[in-house]
Amino acid sequence: MSIRVVVADDHPVFRNGLRTLVEESPGLTYAGEAADGRQAVEVCAAAEPDVVLMDIRMPEVSGIDATRRILAARPQTAVLMLTMLEDDTSVFAAMRAGARGYILKGADEEQILRAVTAVAAGEVIFGAAVAARMAAFFQGGQRSAAPAFPALSAREHDILELIAGGLSNPAIAQRLALSEKTVRNNVSSIFAKLRVADRAEAIVRARDAGLGR
């Protein structure tokens, strides 16, 4: 049975390259494409793909939010993140959103095809570089924000992690592919939930819990 694949990426050249790869690969069927996260949700609703190759940084709606929406409507779809971002925050945000795989855009065609087949079969897969980072994260004994701040949502955890790392709101917006207004709203919510008065106090609380290191 052929694996139906949708490609969501805002770079036309890269998107076209993936389309060619899928169309020329036995066992795969190109089911559609999207240039931003909002289109990705709409295309997946219509095409009902088995696998979505999803970039993280896209206009309108980020790949992370698009993943949440796609899986809320159709949990059996496998989302494979294919991105330039390999930082811990991006990887864990993708996993919290429900992505089954995370590989970098530098991966060769064989690696991409192997990953598509794996996630379609229900496996969880990481590219070598990402897997190494995750191993280092857990071997280093770093703690997740979740046990320390259970009242925060997954997105708020990600933003607090970056606040603890010293990033400004515009930098956080760029890193997570969000609007600055969305970041500001989340920061206000974080302050309220942590019962802190300002950013400096939030950083102290977060770093005490092991974030931002």
Image (spheres, grey):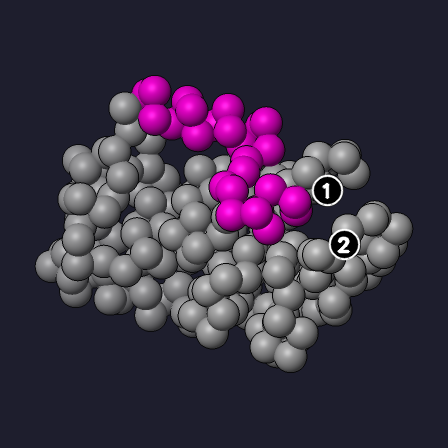
Q: Residues within 10 Å of mark 2 (few under 14, many from 20)?
A: many
Mark 1 or mark 2, which is nearer to you?
2
Question: Which residue is found at the position 59% from the left and 27% from the top?
Answer: 128
Q: Position of residue 138 (x, y in %)?
A: 34, 26
The kind of residue tagged 1 is: Leu
Q: Which residue is mark 1?
A: 113
Direction from residue 194 to residue 70 in the image, left or right: right
123, above or below 178, in the image: above
27, above or below 84, in the image: below
Q: Considering the image in quadrants, where does the C terminus appear?
A: top left
Residues at badges 1 and 2 in contact (C-beta under 8 Å)?
Answer: yes
Residue 210 painted magenta: no
| Badge number at residue 39 | none
Q: Position of residue 105 (x, y in %)?
A: 70, 41
Q: Residues within 10 Å of mark 1 (few under 14, many from 20)?
A: some
User: Mark 2: which secondary structure?
Assistant: strand
The one nearer the camera, 124 or 176, is: 124
The kind of residue tagged 2 is: Leu
Segment tinted magenta in the rendering: 116-140
| Badge number at residue 28 | 2
* Quarter of image, res 38: bottom right
Residue 125 painted magenta: yes
The one nearer the camera, 178 or 53, is: 53
Q: How far apart are the two marked residues, 1 and 2, measured between alpha carbons?
A: 9 Å
Q: Residue furthest front?
A: 1
Question: Which residue is found at the position 64% from the left and 41% from the top?
Answer: 115
